[in-house]
Amino acid sequence: MKEIALAGNANSGKTTLFNYLTGANQRVGNWPGVTVERKAGYLKKDKAILLQDLPGIYSLSPYTPEELVTRKYLLEKRPDKIVDVVDATNIERNLYLTLQLLETKIPLVVALNMADLLNKQGRRINTKKLAYLLGIPVIKISALKRKNIDTLVGEMQKKQATPEIIPKYDPRLESALAQIAKQLQGIVAKDELRFYAIKLFERDEQIQAELKLDAKRQETIACLIQTAEKIFDDESSSIIINARYDFISRVMDQCVIDEGDFSLSISDRIDLIVTNRFLALPIFFGVMWVVYYLSIQVIGTAGSDWLNDVLFGKYIPNFTEELLRSWHVAPFMQGLIIDGIIGGVGAVLGFLPQIMMLFLCLGILEDCGYMSRIAFVMDRIFRRFNLSGKSFIPLLVSTGCGVPGIMATRTIEAEKDRKMTIMLTTFMPCSAKLTVIALIAGTFFKGQSLAAPAAYFLGIIAVIGSGIYLKKTALFAGDPQPFVMELPAYHLPKLDNIVRYVWLKSKGFVQKAGTIIFASMVVIWFLSNFNFRLEQVPEEESMLKGLGSLLAPVFVPLGFGDWRAVSAVLTGLIAKENCVATLQVAFGNPPQARFDQLLIAAYTPMAAYAFLAFNLLCAPCFAAIGAMHKEYGDASWTWRAIGYQTFLAYLVAMLIYQISVLASGNYSIYNVVLVLLGITLIVYGLFIKKSKPQPLEQTIEMRGSEWSQR
Ligand code: GDP
Ligand code: MG
């Protein structure tokens, strides 16, 4: 058994390669921080090789959580080989890591990825020379286009000696390193001398702590470093950085030919418009409007209507009813199966076409590179409010599911920002909440193209608004973190990536309907058909009504102070799909009435929208709460987060409903008071406690050669 690690910068294509080689379904995303934990899988072609997909890193100095995970793994586990996935279009920056990987003396292969883009860039890289200068195999591949992967696998299977050629830097630096290495003799393995010498020279605190050198050695080393700093008139860590870039530029001179004609590439030209200071946001809103409107209200609806009205509305129930009757199944069992399970689970499954359509659109936007621009654009806006664009990446992940979104916050180094982002991540509509959006938009707002997209924008506004407010509170105040993000070139979406994405989302959705929702509906059906003396009764006398009515008064100001909606909110905590399923079961199955007509009779459109807003923003499902608890590692923080989310949800939903009451003209003083109270609270949060003016635009956008020092 051999263990091989994939290491490289963020976005160099490690996960794409990993998925292809192992047949795994890890998420490929073109923003940093998608892979926060390492993932392992066996090679499809050679089960004797275990491949590790590591989080993307820029150096082996532990600055970021990703770097910590990767460095710990490489240094402690020492895999049999590292495949360094290098983005050939950004070779200068990527080689910076390659040099450090070489120093670990773990056998190394360079996979020069994205070779398909080189031609377009007008660049040629001589791999033979590069391999010669680095003393390790270099293979040009394209993980996306599946080019030359077999050669790489062949190289992975080969036995490879420890790399011998070690880049030689400035002689004045080399002598310091040699003398530090001498101090380490007998303390670290011979092969690792240079790595540790360099780390000590950089004054890497973790390595200092790990080595536990005696005072004399420590002093000798400190003295050497000080001398070097005087000679170079520079800090020790930047002496190393400069030495590495000097070496890289010498290598580049030898191996890289640039024929590029300095004009902007198509990708850069698209970015001029898409990330334009003024156009970026309107374009983003436009794009998301089209995506949500098309998938939830237009295209997806056709499929859903058929599923809801015909398949789960007629064929399956009628067929099952016949069957159950012919088997003489007890009437209450028939009710459970037809109204409870088929009705409830079917109501959720009916939205599968919308889910698939939405993830198809999101998958395309993500894969082609558009979504990573949004993180960059949002960073520009967030920064004005002391937030970092890093906080936006978990939100993008959350549009699939809140749990990985919450986990993605691990890339945020600033503890306060991370805690805050965990709190805000689940405001984004995940696939489960989509069923609620689709139900409300499809039932109450037919043909109104803003209804579904507005739910998405409401999520974003809740995030930004909360960010502005929370950043001013003592709990979260602090300067924004620098956000380094590289914008990968746009490329045509890759069909199998997208199919895999849609398939995974749909599979998860159906599985959840068949398990959690199924079980919930059995319970809900029971509660809504029996009274506390366990006699079968109509819904109006059921336990569910009794229980729901207890809390119903709390929701009267929100317009849905009704036991059915309240039960839906509560079961939504188990899984948000339950909101839809519970409504369906709670409304029962009166003859000749359609579910949507029952809903329209029970709630006003704006009460329904308030219901949607509340479920969108309030405490997330238990799975997400569990993830929050895990990341906070602290119950009081989890409660604080849930409390804030639920409070905000209540406030927003109340305003939506109460303003609609005012607008209808038919209001009382009570409505006016509620609206004024709500608006005052929001204005207070946003404006009253003014924060200090902050420097704007600190983001560094890294692109190829512009990247020089970290
Ligand atoms: P990771 O961060 O290193 O795991 O990178 P990913 O595998 O998530 O890929 C980042 C982005 O680069 C995705 O949009 C991929 O589709 C894209 N990508 C990966 N390999 C290639 C390649 O060989 N050519 C091109 N053009 N794009 C690629
Ligand atoms: Mg990855």
Image: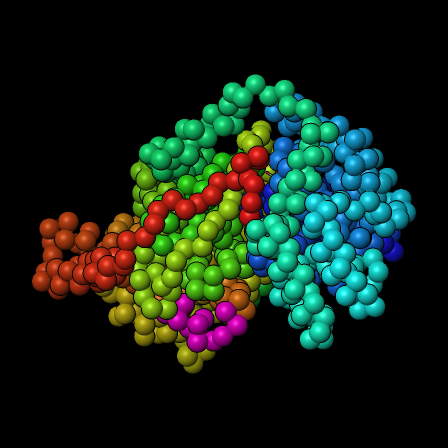
Q: Residue drawn 64% across and 58% down?
A: 227
Image-quarter location of ligand 1: top right
Left or right? Give the position of 578 relative to 199. left
Residue 175 image point, x, y percent: 74, 53
Color scheme of the displayed model = rainbow
Q: Nearer the viewer, residue 119 or 27?
A: 119
Q: Residue drawn 25% across and 54% down?
A: 656
Labels in figure, total: 0
Q: Residue drawn 44% across and 45% down?
A: 699
**Rendered position, 299 above or below 589:** above
Left or right? Give the position of 466 relative to 329. left
Q: Looking at this rendering, what residue extends furthest in the right direction?
A: 159
**Rendered position, 694 above or below 544:** above
Determine the main secondary structure of the stretch shown in magenta: helix
Q: Residue drawn 61% across and 24% down?
A: 121
- Quadrant of the rendered structure where residue 411 is? bottom right
Q: Nearer the viewer, residue 160 or 600?
A: 160
Residue 292 image point, x, y percent: 42, 40
Q: Nearer the viewer, residue 276 or 556?
A: 276
Q: Looking at this rendering, what residue extends furthest in the bottom direction?
A: 533
Magenta-span inclusion, residue 96: no
Quadrant location of the N terminus in the rendered image: bottom right
Left or right? Give the position of 354 relative to 42. left
- Is residue 314 among what the camera can see? no
- Is residue 451 among what the camera can see? yes
Q: Which region shows up in magenta?
A: 632-643
- Quadrant of the rendered structure where residue 226 is? bottom right
